[in-house]
Amino acid sequence: MRNAKDLFSLEGKVAIVTGGRGLYGASISEGLCEMGATVVIASRSGDKCEEFASTLREKGYEAVGMSLDLSNDDSIQQLVSSVLEQYGKIDILVNNAVDRSNLTSLDAATREKLQASMSTNLNGQILLSQAVLSDMVKRKSGSIINIGSMRGVDCPHFPFYPESFGDQAVNYTTEKWAMVGLTKYMAGRYGKDGIRINCISPGGFDPGLADDPDKKDFQATYIDNCPLHRWANEDDIKGPVCFLASDAAAYVTGENLVMDGGWTIW
């Protein structure tokens, strides 16, 4: 029987975190580093990813920034090839990146916007997972964690949103629901290869809202109607990600862990 602390350790593991320097992304990357993993932080802004990785290295962690455009097949293959060449394996993939530039309300939706959004936010996640799974299958080991949203469990509660927010994006909700389905599909398909695929659906985290006069009222309404009665913070996602990435979750696959302060239980 293994010690519980050892089960949670990620020492010797190599992880890729897409969008790994953003709101939740930075916390995810740092949390994996804190548990001992070597973390590849990837996004279209490779230089900025490397800047963030350097701050983690200054703390004594193993991290590197690399470029990744999830709408470009060559970029996906280049990232995976570079990681395998440098580290020899990929143990953990966190599909966290979101391109918000083509999010649109239903009234304003066009085929071009919908396809452009899905190219990154869904199809890109599928194709990156495909590339990473090729290595994981060979080694009969791996963990993929898809970062969804509470919007992939319910829908926007429209009465809570002030006009200053504008209408809510139809493709964001649709894509996040699809991430849960993708998780279950891949978990069922690759379980026999010793690979676990899970999803985390977090609640809202945007500390800047408290300082935005047009949006702070929404944040207050959210807090008033959340069972834990608070906004998410930068530490809240670290535990769930590190748990699902580790051997502590060795018998957990195909799950959608909802991390929303209880919002969706009402």
Image: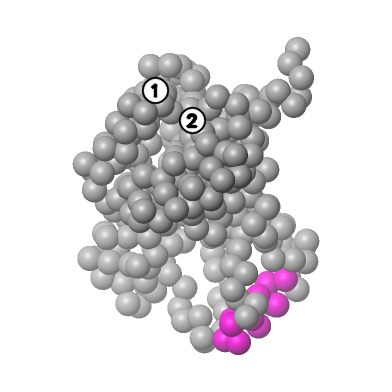
Position of residue 15 relative to residue 117, above or below, is: above
Circle nearer the N terminus (2, 1): 2
To which residue does mark 1 refer? 88
The type of residue carrying mark 2 is Val
* Colouring mode (rainbow / by chain / secondary structure / one colour): one colour
| Labels 2 and 1 touching (C-beta < 8 A) | yes
Label placed on residue 74: none
Position of residue 174 relative to residue 223, above or below, is: above
Q: In this view, does 41 lie to the left or right of 260?
A: left
To which residue does mark 2 refer? 14
Q: Residue at x 36, y 53 (%)?
A: 47
The type of residue carrying mark 1 is Gly
Mark 1 closeness class: few <14, some 14–19, many ≥20 residues within 10 Å: few
Q: Residue 189 falls in which quadrant of the image?
A: top left
Secondary structure beneath disc 1? loop
Q: In which quarter of the image is the N terminus?
A: top right
Q: Front-most of 9 and 221? A: 9
Find the magenta span and give its range: 212-223
In magenta segment, residue 32: no
Q: Which residue is drawn at 62% across and 69% down?
A: 207
Mark 2 closeness class: few <14, some 14–19, many ≥20 residues within 10 Å: many
Query: Can you give x and y, in whole percent of width and height, for residue 181 in the image?
Result: 46, 43
Secondary structure beneath disc 2? strand
Give the Cα separation between the discs numbered 2 and 1.
Answer: 9 Å
Magenta span dominant secondary structure: helix
Q: Front-most of 71 and 221? A: 71
Query: Can you give x and y, in whole percent of width and height, for residue 101 in the image?
Result: 35, 67
Q: In this view, does 14 lie to the left or right of 34?
A: left
Position of residue 60 relative to residue 217, above or below, is: above
Residue 18 visible in this rendered orientation of the protein: no
Q: In which quarter of the image is the C terminus?
A: bottom right
